[in-house]
Image (spheres, helix red, strand yellow):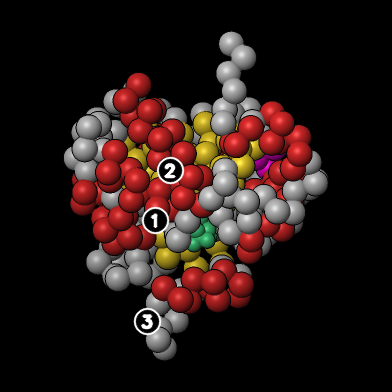
Amino acid sequence: MKVLILKSAELATEAASREILSLVEAKPDCTLGLATGGTMEPVYAALRQGAGAISFAGVRSFNLDEYVGLAPDHAQSYHRYMAEQLFDHIDIRPENTHVPRGDAASPNTEARLFDEAIAAAGGIDLQLLGLGANGHIGFNEPFSSLGSRTRVKTLTRKTREDNARLFAEGEEVPTYAITMGVGTIMEARRILLVATGAHKACAVAAMIEGPVSAACPASVLQFHPQATILLDEGAASALKMRDYYDFVHPNGQDVDLG
Ligand code: F6R
């Protein structure tokens, strides 16, 4: 794992968008795995700015997850989030973007077809990830199988509480989501996880320094050969080896020894 600690959330999210833009520049027909959530909003804001000079016309994308029961035009659907945050502002072709359909007649079939579509696209070059305060990636809640494929998951009360702020007052956060599986995520050729804020510090420490365990699904990234973790000071604040990460990557800079 490459652990890069930046001085602020702004610097961490800008670094994430730079990574994505440089991949799109180097490989215009790349396949991106995309995430939603509050952490990603500044990442997509920086991408919208940078995308002026770089075309996404050849890019394909697959999103991690969607709430079961929400149609694409629902205000809290991840379809809508992606349109508002990114897709409507760049030249990516709508037919090249893939977000699981929460309103599919059979969510299980939708999940299976989603994995097949990723495979048919030749796999994901770079998977962007956020981190749940309980250690989830995608909607793979604690004790998800570390080999799981895209499927329907029941959300924990904690995740539903965390996400309630995004729903209208009195509106229930859905109980189920379709999410890429942990095994599906691990097949991406590169992983870029962004976590910001002190409320993520315990999950970050468990992911990077804890034992690999389904108790913290993100800890499986310790097995990924090319996983980069971008953190701000708050998210890095519970790391035991903090000095070492700073020594290896001063100010969160990637040092290439050739
Ligand atoms: C969203 C997703 C989730 C979020 C995580 C963090 O597509 O897959 O794993 O990345 O819940 O969410 P925020 O950034 O809102 O704290």
Tag 1 and tag 3, C-beta contact below 8 Å: no
Report the front residue among 253 and 217.
Answer: 253
* Type of the residue with mark 1: Glu
Q: Earlier in the sequence, mark 3 or mark 2?
A: 2
Q: CA distance from mark 2 to mark 1?
A: 11 Å
Q: Name the front one of labels 2 and 1.
A: 2
Looking at the rendering, the stretch of residues picked out in magenta corresponds to 220-224
Does residue 244 lie above or below 39 as drawn? above
Q: Which residue is mark 1?
A: 41
The quadrant where residue 29 appears: top left
**Mark on residue 14?**
2
Does residue 240 lie above or below 72 as drawn? above
Task: Identify which residue is drawn at 27% across, 43% down.
Answer: 49
The picture places residue 66, in percent across and down from the top left corner, at 41, 60
Q: Earlier in the sequence, mark 1 or mark 3?
A: 1
Q: Name the front one of labels 3 and 2.
A: 2
The picture places residue 83, in percent across and down from the top left corner, at 26, 55
Quadrant where the image shows the C terminus: top right
The answer to whether one can see residue 51 in this image is yes
Task: Identify which residue is drawn at 26% across, 38% down.
Answer: 51
User: Going by the image, does 132 lie left or right of 21?
Assistant: right
Does residue 173 lie above or below 92 as drawn? below
Element carrying mark 3 = loop
Q: CA distance from mark 3 to mark 2?
A: 30 Å
Q: Earlier in the sequence, mark 2 or mark 1?
A: 2
Tag 3 and tag 2, C-beta contact below 8 Å: no
Q: Which residue is mark 3?
A: 168
The picture places residue 47, in percent across and down from the top left corner, at 33, 43
Quadrant where the image shows the N terminus: top right
The answer to whether one can see residue 216 in this image is no
